[in-house]
Amino acid sequence: MSSDPQIVIGGGLGGLSAALSLLAAGREVILFEKNDAVGGKASQRYLGAYRFDTGPSLVTLKGVFERLFSLSGVALDAYISFKELHPITSYFFPDGTRVCSDSGEAMVHAFTRSLEVTEEEMRRYASYTREIYELTHRIFLEKSLHRRETYLNRETLHALLRFNRVDTMRTMDQANRTMFTDERMIQLANRAATYNGSSPYRTPATFNNIFHVEHGLGGYAVENGIYGIVEGLKRRIEELGGEIRTSTPVERILYNSDRRITGVQVDSQRYSSDTVFSDVDTIHLYRDLLKDTKSPLYRRYLKLEPSSSAVVFYWGIAGTFTELSVHNIFFSSDYHREFHEIHSLHTLPSEPTIYINITSKVTPSDAPEGKENWFVLINAPHSGERSDPHEIERLRASVLARLEQELKVDVGAMIEEEELLTPHDIEKETGSYRGSLYGISSNTRLSAFLRHRNRSNRYEGLYHTGGTVHPGGGMPLALLSGMISVEEYLHHSGGSSLWES
C-alpha cells in the first residue's frame, strides 16, 4: 500500500463523505476544492443582512448522517443540530386548498382532513411506499451495484422474489392514479419525482418510495442552515487530521500507460498518490481532468438525458408570513403540461410550480428581525447556455402574480434584496453538466443501473462520488456515494470493511 495520502477532488457532500470515511479507516487525506469554500451545491451566500442556503433544503434519511459520523467514532448531534419538522411542507393548490403535510400517524390525518382521500387510501399508500423502500434501500442505496457480492446474498434474493412489488413497469403517475381519485393528492404524490429531477409521467413508480422517505421517516431542518451540515463535516475531517485546500483547482488527474492512477496536477505541481476519489461531475471528469473523451463511459453519458435544473430567486423579504412554513409548495394548475415543457420541450414552464424555503423560521439570524429569507425555486430544463433574460423576467412576473394572488399582498414590493441563479450559473459554479441538479434523469426503468459506478473499471485507483454516480443525487445519496466508494476501495485493497462494521 502506498504511503502517499489519499486524494479527494471536490468538496461537495460526496467528497466530504469520502474524506471522512477514509480518515475513519485510518488513511491520510488531502481534499482539493476549486472554490473558496467547500459545500458544492450545498453552499451559502449572503445578501446584505440575509443568509441563504444555495441549494438543498429538506433533510431526509437522517440515519445516513448518523451512520457517517458514527464511522469516525462520534455522535452526529455533537456536530450538526437537526430539527424534526411538523409540518414538513405547506401545500397551496390553485383552487384555494391548503395542506400541511406531516410524518407518521399525523400524515394520515393531515391529508384526510384537507383532501378527498380516506384513511384506508392513505394507509394503503403508506404501506405500498414503505414496502418499496424496504425492498430496495439496502441494495440500491447502500451497496455497489457493480460488485458480485451485492447480488449473492439472502437480502437480495428476498427482494428479487418480490420484484413485482418494486413496481418498475408503471410510471409514478400511473401507480398513483390507482391509489387515489383526488387530483390534488395525485399531484402531491407525483411531486416526489422532482427530488431527483425527473418527470412523474416517465419515472418508474419505484420512486414512489420517496413518499415513505419523507412522510414515513420524517423531514428535518438544520438549526444553523443546511450549510451547517457542511461545517460539521469539515470540522470532523480537520479534527481527524484531514487537509482541506480551498481555492485550489485540480488541473489534471495523472495516470501511466496502464491507466494506473499516479496522482494529480495542481498549479503545475504534482501530488503523488495511487488513489484518487473524484467528487466531480462525470462529463467534466473525463473531458477536463482525465483528458479522455474516447472513453466509452464519457460517450455514453453525453447521450444520457440529464436531470432537470432550476431557476432560483434569492429574495430578502421585508415582512413575515405566518401562513408559510419552512417549506412551501404552490402547485401549478396543469402539472402534466409543466413537466412536458421542462422535460420534452426544454422550455421554462409557462405556469410554474413554486417552491419557497424560509430558513429564518428555524434560524432567526438568517434574516433581520421581522423579515424573512426566501429561497424561491422553479424547476427548469437543463441547459448549458445562458438563459434568455426576457424569459427569466416573464418567469419572475408569473411567480409574483401567483404569490400575490395566494398571499393577498404585493410580494414584489417587499423584496429588498435579490439575486438570481440560472442553469448556466449552476453549471459554471458547480461544474454540473448543463446545469443538471442530479446527474442523469430517472426517466427510464434502467436509470438506477446507468449511473456511474463507484470504482472505476477503466482507471486503477480511481473512485467516484457525488450526485452523478451511484446511488444518485440529493444530500443523503451523495453522502452514501462517498461511503460506498471508500468501502469499494477498502474491499479492493484488502483493507477491513468500514461500511459493514
Image (cartoon, rainbow, N blue to C red):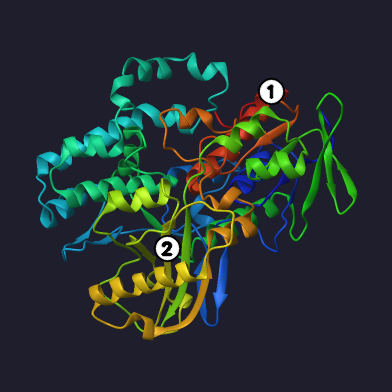
Closer to the eye: label 2 or 1: 2
Query: Horizontal and vertical percent for residue 380?
Result: 44, 56
Q: Say which residue appears at 57% left-offset and 32% top-offset.
A: 499
Q: Disc 1 on helix, strand or loop?
A: helix
Residue at 72% across, 46% down: 9
| Residue 151 showing in the rendered view | yes
Q: Is residue 423 left or right of residue 171?
A: right
- 431 or 494: which is nearer to us? 431
Q: CA distance from mark 2 to mark 1?
A: 41 Å
Q: Residue at x 34, y 30 (%)?
A: 134
What residue sits right under mark 2 in the picture? 377
Residue 478, above or below 316: above
Pointer 2 or 1: first along the chain:
2
Q: Is residue 284 above or below residue 222?
A: above
Left or right of 252? Residue 33 is left
- For the N terminus, the image quarter is top right
* Disc 1 residue crowd, few under 14, some 14–19, many 20+, Cα 10 Å: few
